[in-house]
Image: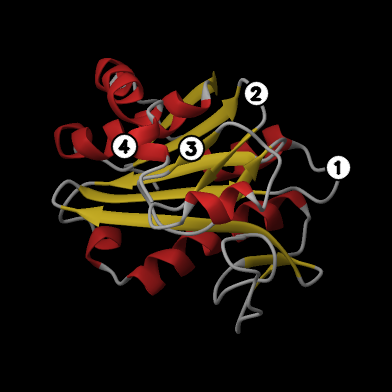
């Protein structure tokens, strides 16, 4: 991670949070280095995978608003979770790896941070199928588990711009968030100029619109 950049973007509106991740993906080639972003939410909400059906998601959670991600996966509640994204430019080894490999790399990275905090976790070596659309009921191969309960999942998108991984940690204990952040980032420098203008554009033209969130 010596060549990675870190972005602590703080609390954001649900649509803007998803828009900024997509904007980072669009501009990661210009940035030229991987970006690890941490963010929070101005209100409880839920996000769901690009291919999910809105009717299934609406019946699964009472959280609102519901925002369709540009990545895959199922329903993720954002009501006290630790949310992050990883963005890699074209040609980076993570971008060139398989989806399974990058998924495992991601959770191994989180596991190392938890170990530094004294929290013992493990990577799932098999699957326990969740209910349709629900990310944190059951677990998939390489999900991060704590006492056999899934605490971290992620979704990915690869395109000509690079690789975007969006992830969430659902803490089960009284774990110090700042210690976890410090263990992850180390001495990584900050991303000084995130693509905020493009994120604002995507917020208003995509992520706040029913034409996107209710498209299927």
| Mark 1 residue element | loop
- Going from the N terminus, do you reach mark 2 or mark 3 first? 2
- Hey, which quadrant is residue 134 in on the image? bottom right
For marks 2 and 4, give the one nearer the viewer: 2
C-alpha span from label 3 to label 4: 13 Å
Q: Alpha-carbon distance for marks 2 and 4?
A: 20 Å
Check disc 1 and report the residue beneath it: 174
Q: Secondary structure at mark 2?
A: loop
Which mark is first along the chain, 1 or 4? 4
Label 3: how many residues lie within 10 Å, few (<14), some (14-19) or many (20+)?
many
As measured in the structure, the alpha-carbon distance from the residue carrying label 1 to the one carrying label 3 is 28 Å
Q: Nearer the viewer, mark 1 or mark 2?
A: 2
Location of residue 69 with respect to 150 vertically, above or below: above
Quadrant of the image occupied by residue 205: top left
Residue annotated with mark 3: 67
Give how far apart the Cα atoms at labels 1 and 2 are.
Answer: 21 Å
User: Which residue has dot 4 on it?
Assistant: 22
């Amino acid at each position: 991670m010596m060549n990675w950049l870190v972005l602590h973007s703080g609390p954001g509106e649900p649509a803007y949070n998803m828009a900024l991740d997509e904007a980072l993906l669009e501009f990661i080639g210009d940035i030229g280095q991987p970006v690890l972003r941490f963010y929070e939410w101005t209100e409880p909400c839920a996000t769901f995978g690009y291919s999910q059906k809105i009717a299934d998601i609406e019946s699964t959670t009472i959280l609102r608003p519901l925002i369709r991600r540009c990545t895959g996966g199922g329903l993720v509640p954002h009501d006290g979770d630790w949310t992050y994204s990883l963005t890699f430019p074209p040609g980076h080894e993570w971008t060139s790896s398989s989806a399974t490999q990058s998924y495992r790399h991601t959770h191994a990275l989180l596991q190392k941070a938890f170990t530094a905090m004294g929290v013992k976790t493990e990577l799932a070596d098999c699957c326990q199928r969740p209910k349709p659309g629900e990310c944190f009921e059951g677990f998939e191969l390489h999900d991060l588990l704590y006492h056999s309960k899934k605490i971290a999942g992620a979704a990915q998108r690869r395109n000509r711009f690079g690789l975007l991984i969006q992830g969430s940690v659902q803490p089960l204990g009284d774990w110090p968030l700042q210690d976890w952040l410090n263990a992850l980032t180390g001495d990584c420098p900050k991303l000084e100029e995130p693509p905020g203008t493009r994120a604002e554009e995507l917020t208003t033209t995509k992520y706040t619109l029913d034409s996107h969130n209710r498209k299927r």
